Image (cartoon, rainbow, N blue to C red):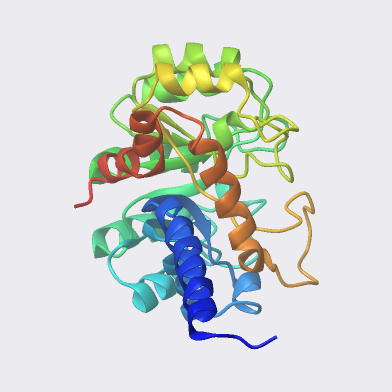
């Protein structure tokens, strides 16, 4: 069949319309839970990671890493829209024991004083695994966050919201970003803490089919109880991708982390459920809340 100019024009018009429709869905977005660990650098260069963010119209990115200075590589490759935060796992091999090293506080003060790091995290406090909430290093990091007026990305995996309650009440000057919406908690577990701790904000990273169970039902529909919670607290939620892969493997030193290779899948998942919210609520969760929380222009 001979392809005429008219047929070619129709094809190009349809293709352009498709591309325009796809781009229209790609609203600017904040990704407030990123990592660029040593094991990820083996698979993805800083330039490749930044390219992924730009392709998905991420205009504000918050990154922590192991070792902590690895996060600075993304900012150098991308610019000041990338916000590095200081990881207590500031050197290799201490992720499980970081809280026994007073040097963490020395390094944290140095990092925050330098102005290169604009927060602390991700800090794992997991009942039964450690550290205790009254640990001197843990408490010292909270005090530094208050002193420098920077947020803390805190990760708790617990069956009750009361685990975080004494922390956010004791350190009520600290802005806490609660990773993964508490991990395994439901809206009815999260709501009471949000009522009692206005300094706690909740992020939905890794709340996807591969990590921390479903808050989107099998038909890709946002669960009603979650939608109601987002609408109730439209200025208290944010989202991110947490691009680590095989995250349930506790020890994976023997293989690189290919999480950044799956970035499209993770980013598209979050865009899908955000589109099911009222437009004004979705815009806040997608971007505006992160701009306000991290106090950026």
Whether residue 121 sits left or right of residue 279 in the image: it is right
Relative depth, front residue between 234 and 218? 218
- Asked if residue 37 lies left or right of residue 278, the reply is right
Residue 289 visible here: yes
Residue 70 visible in this rendered orientation of the protein: no
Image quadrant where residue 76 sits = bottom left
Quarter assignment of residue 244: bottom right
Q: Tell me the quadrant of the picture where the N terminus can be found.
A: bottom right
Where does residue 201 sit, x and y in percent of width and height? 41, 30
Q: Give me the residue at 32% from left, 38% from top.
A: 289
Q: Quadrant of residue 95?
A: bottom right
Looking at the image, residue 215 sits to the left or right of residue 54; the answer is: right
Q: Single out the residue that lies furthest toward the bottom.
A: 2
Q: How many marks?
A: 0
Residue 195: x and y, percent?
41, 12
Q: Give x and y (percent) for residue 134.
A: 51, 29
Q: Nearer the viewer, residue 104 or 207?
A: 207
- Give the answer, above or below, for where 240 lies relative to 278: below
Give the answer, above or below, for where 52 lies relative to 86: below
Q: Is residue 41 above or below residue 282?
A: below
Could you tell me residue 193's position as x and y percent? 48, 16
- Horizontal arrangement in the rendering, residue 287 relative to residue 37 (left or right): left
State the residue in front, 249 or 244: 244
């Amino acid at each position: 069949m001979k392809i005429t100019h008219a047929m070619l024009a129709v094809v190009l018009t349809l293709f352009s319309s498709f591309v325009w429709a796809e781009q229209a869905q790609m609203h600017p977005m904040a990704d407030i839970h990123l990592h660029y660990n040593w094991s990820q650098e083996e698979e993805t260069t800083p330039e490749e990671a930044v390219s992924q963010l730009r392709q998905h119209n991420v205009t504000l990115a918050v990154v922590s890493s192991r070792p902590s200075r690895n996060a600075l590589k993304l900012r150098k490759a991308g610019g000041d829209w990338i916000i590095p935060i200081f990881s207590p796992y500031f050197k290799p091999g201490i992720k499980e024991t970081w809280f026994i090293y007073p040097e963490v506080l020395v390094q944290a003060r140095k990092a925050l004083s330098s102005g290169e790091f604009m927060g602390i995290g991700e800090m794992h406090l997991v009942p039964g695994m450690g550290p205790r909430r009254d640990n001197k290093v843990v408490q010292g990091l909270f005090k530094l966050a208050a002193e420098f007026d920077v947020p803390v990305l805190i990760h708790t995996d617990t069956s009750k919201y009361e685990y975080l309650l004494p922390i956010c009440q004791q350190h009520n000057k600290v802005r806490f970003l609660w990773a993964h919406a508490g991990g395994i908690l439901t809206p009815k577990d999260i709501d009471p803490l949000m009522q009692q701790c206005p300094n706690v904000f909740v992020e939905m990273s890794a709340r996807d089919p591969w990590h921390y169970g479903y808050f989107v039902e099998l038909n890709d529909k946002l669960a009603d109880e979650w939608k109601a919670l987002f609408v109730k607290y439209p200025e208290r939620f944010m989202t991110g991708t947490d691009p680590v892969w095989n995250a349930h493997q506790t020890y994976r030193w023997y293989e690189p982390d290919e999480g950044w290779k799956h970035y499209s899948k993770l980013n598209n998942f979050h865009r899908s459920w955000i589109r099911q919210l009222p437009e004004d609520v979705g815009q806040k969760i997608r971007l505006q809340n992160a701009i306000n929380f991290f106090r950026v222009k």
